[in-house]
Image (spheres, rainbow, N blue to C red):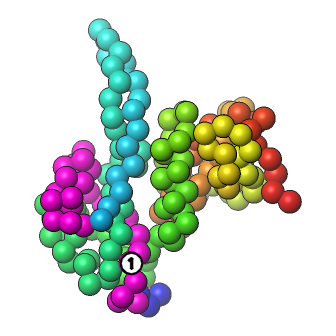
Amino acid sequence: MILKPNILRWYAVYTAPRAEKKVSERFSEVGIEHYLALQTVKRRWSDRVKEVIVPVVNGYIFVHILPVDFDRVTKIYGAIAFIKEAGQPAPIPDNQMDNLRFMVENSDEPVEFSQENFERGESVCISKGPLEGMLGELIEVKGKHKVLVRLERFGSAITTVPVSFIEKIK
């Protein structure tokens, strides 16, 4: 793929372990547009349960940059490398990033992320609830209906949706 030098695109950047929030802060300080998908989850310790804010995609942050900014991104402490395809940073289509953001920001359930490549399922539209209007693929995992949003060359975001909220796309 030939990257056009004057088009802003989304890319996934691998970060140092547990450094996603710090890298996000550093990107903000230097003006690099980025998205760190965060969600609040309940974590259980032996003596308590606490709500903590954690990345949806461990070890990665998404940047919206021009190809000329590749070096600028990887010079930020904690930003290790881009996800690449054929030796070049692999762009993620805008609509897929929009879907991921929409899912993370509006889902009532925690969003799971998997780099496993699921088999393509039925195309669905969510017809009710906070994710209404979102398009995705229906998958069934252990009896729970889940909607999958695929990020090309990267992985998939998944959340649980009641089956009554889902309609097949004709």
Magenta residues?
4-32
- Disc 1: which residue: 8
Quarter holding the C terminus is: bottom right
Assess whether residue 28 is covered by the magenta stretch: yes
Whether residue 23 is visible, yes or no, is no
User: Mark 1 falls on what kind of element?
Assistant: loop
Residue in view at x 24 percent, y 54 percent: 24
The type of residue carrying mark 1 is Leu
Picture coordinates of residue 97 (x, y %)? Answer: 49, 61
In the foreground, 21 or 155: 21
**On screen, 104 above or below 50?**
below
Decide: few, some or many residues near mark 1? Use Cα within 10 Å; few <14, some 14-19, many ≥20. some
Determine which quarter of the picture holds residue 121: bottom right
Whether residue 3 is visible, yes or no, is yes
Image-based side of 2 in relation to 117, left or right? left
Residue in view at x 54 percent, y 47 percent: 103
Picture coordinates of residue 122 (x, y %)? Answer: 77, 54
Residue in view at x 25 percent, y 78 percent: 69
Residue in view at x 20 percent, y 77 percent: 71
Picture coordinates of residue 169 (x, y %)? Answer: 81, 57
Image-based side of 120 in relation to 102, left or right? right
Picture coordinates of residue 41 (x, y %)? Answer: 41, 29
